[in-house]
Amino acid sequence: MTSRVGPRAAGTNGSDFKHKERVVPHYQMSASLKSEVRKLNLVHLLIWLLVAAQMAVSHFNLVSHDTVSMPYQWEYPYLLSLLPLLCSSLSLPKNNISYLVISMISGGLFSVAPLIYGGMEMFPVAQQLYRHGKAYRFIFGFSAVTVMYLIMVVAVQVHAWQLYYMKKLLDSWFNATQEKKKK
């Protein structure tokens, strides 16, 4: 152990730290990427909870349909986006490449694809709102298409960053396993 106070070992001027072990860069990258993926998973979970809450409130008639409108068609398959979230969360503690790949593929299918479909599904309604100022669905007094487009914009960014960071994490883990096989 080092001490800031007290005598220094004879023959050293304090610059003999270069021989000490350092953390390999891909481990540092893996740790920082895992942190980013965890943060994005949390935001993804919050978006999923918002969509699920809107659907539950609407389907169970907890409030009138004037307050919270019926969900759009794209929201049903988006609920399956919990699967990639669980797979990525399971892959992080033990650096499980298989779960991470499953998460990336299912993220495209269950997260990104419903958002693309939803953008196309809601476009005519958004166009009508923009041109004529008429809205027929509302969420707490706001136009449902406006609220859902705002959620979609955030969700697309979150899923894009998730896929980007998971790809970088996959590359980091794959390089680490290749280096172990070379030794």
Image (cartoon, rainbow, N blue to C red):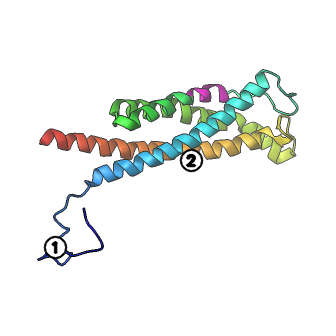
Residue drawn at (69%, 26%), measured in percent from left and top?
A: 73
Most frequent secondary structure within the magenta stretch: helix
Query: Which label was assigned to residue 9?
Result: 1
- Foreground of the two, 80 or 6: 6
**Residue 24 against residue 73 in the figure, above or below:** below
Does 36 appear in magenta?
no
Element carrying mark 2 = helix
Q: What residue type is labelled 1?
A: Ala
| Disc 1 to disc 2, C-alpha distance | 54 Å
The answer to whether residue 28 is left or right of residue 138 is left
Say whether residue 99 is left or right of residue 131.
left
Is 3 in front, or is 172?
Answer: 3
Q: Residue drawn at (75%, 37%), measured in percent from left and top?
A: 124
Residues in magenta, as a range: 75-80
Q: Quadrant where the C terminus lies?
A: top left
Q: How crowded is mark 2: few (under 14 residues within 10 Å), some or many (20 or more)?
A: few
| Quadrant in the rendering for residue 98 | top left
Foreground: 16 or 58? Answer: 16
How would you rate the neighbour count of disc 1 (Cα within 10 Å): few for under 14, some for 14-19, many for 20 or more?
Answer: few
Q: Which residue is pictured at 74% across the width and 31% down the height?
A: 54
Which numbered circle lies on residue 91?
Answer: none
Residue 162 x/y as whole percent: 48, 43
Residue under numbered circle 2: 157
User: In the image, what residue occupies the spot 68% across and 29% down?
Assistant: 52
Vertical arrangement, residue 25 with respect to residue 174, above or below: below
